[in-house]
């Protein structure tokens, strides 16, 4: 993530990547927030709202892939083999956080994609919508927890709350809210309905707004002209 320090007038490849990463996260978060707004869902209808969540999840996946690539490039930059497309580095906290997060976005793709289908029984909705949604939320929570740990470790060196610290804090809060949303969306088979629909929508809205704020902070700052 961008640490907010002054950059040259010519953006580096990493800065361009972080710009698109942040932009994709902003769009995805905005779509999730929009889909969770009752006035929108009531006016647009169930299918359009489900489509909004699905498209938002695709933007999340695009951003998550770019973030994963940034971690991989950072690990392979100094290796003798040059840049690599994929590495296995579970001991590296940045790699682990981005890999888990990317897996979470894929679970959200599967969940929101299945939610587009009509007339799903409670049992099928449980298997194809709620469970992958829960796995995606759990992955986001784990990834955000790792990023938070790294941010707290970095903060201990000077005690300041940097942009990375605020990004990690917002993403962790958003992941907790998504977890609450997933738990509240549990399908009650006997009633053929979700457990707490209003709480689920609220959790999605709060989580999406937290992710949106974190993504805005992720945008690279304008370059400064030295001299």
Image (tube, grey):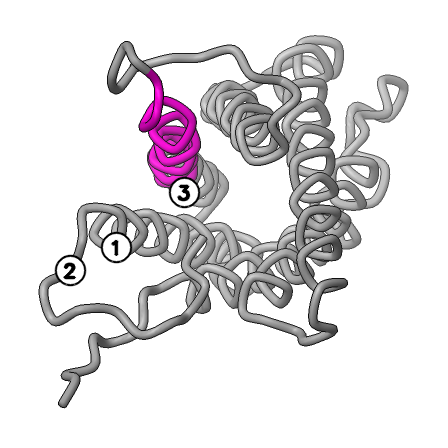
Give the SS element for disc 3.
Answer: helix
Taking 91 as reference, is 202 above or below it? Answer: below
Secondary structure beneath dot 1 equals helix
The image shows a total of numbered marks equal to: 3
Q: Is residue 14 left or right of residue 217?
A: left
Residue 56, disc: 3
Does residue 69 show up magenta in the picture? yes
Q: Which residue is mark 1?
A: 15
Q: Foreground mark, 1 or 3?
A: 1
Q: Quadrant of the C terminus?
A: bottom left
Asked whether 223 or 117 is in front, the reply is 223
**How far across and down, in percent of the image, does residue 157 sit?**
71, 64
Mark 1 is surrounded, within 10 Å at the Cα level, by few (under 14), some (14 to 19) or many (20 or more) other residues, namely some
The residue labelled by disc 2 is 11
- Give the Cα separation between the discs numbered 1 and 3: 23 Å
Residue 196 percent location from the top left of the image: 83, 44
Disc 2 is placed on an element classified as: loop
Extent of the magenta region? 59-79
Looking at the image, is mark 2 or mark 3 earlier in the sequence?
A: 2
Tell me, yes or no, whether the two marked residues, 1 and 2, touch with CB atoms within 8 Å: yes
In front: 203, or 192?
A: 203
Report the residue at 74% width, 44% height from top: 181
């Amino acid at each position: 993530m961008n640490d907010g320090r002054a950059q040259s007038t010519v953006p580096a490849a990493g800065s361009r990547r972080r710009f698109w990463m942040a932009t994709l996260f902003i769009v995805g978060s905005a779509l999730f927030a929009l889909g969770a707004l009752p006035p929108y869902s009531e006016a647009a209808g169930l299918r359009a709202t489900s489509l909004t969540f699905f498209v938002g999840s695709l933007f999340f996946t695009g951003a998550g892939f770019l973030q994963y690539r940034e971690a991989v490039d950072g690990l392979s930059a100094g290796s003798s083999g040059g840049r690599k497309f994929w590495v296995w580095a579970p001991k590296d906290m940045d790699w682990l956080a981005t890999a888990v997060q990317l897996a979470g976005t894929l679970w959200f793709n599967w969940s929101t994609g299945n939610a587009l289908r009509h007339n799903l029984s409670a049992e099928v909705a449980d298997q194809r919508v709620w469970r992958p949604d829960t796995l995606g939320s759990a992955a986001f929570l784990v990834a955000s927890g790792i990023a938070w740990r790294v941010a707290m470790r970095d903060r201990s060196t000077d005690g300041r709350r940097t942009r990375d610290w605020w990004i990690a804090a917002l993403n962790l809060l958003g992941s907790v809210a998504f977890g609450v949303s997933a738990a509240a969306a549990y399908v009650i088979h006997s009633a053929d309905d979700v457990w707490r629909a209003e709480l689920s929508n609220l959790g999605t809205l709060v989580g999406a707004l937290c992710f949106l704020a974190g993504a805005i902070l992720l945008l690279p700052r304008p370059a400064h002209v030295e001299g």
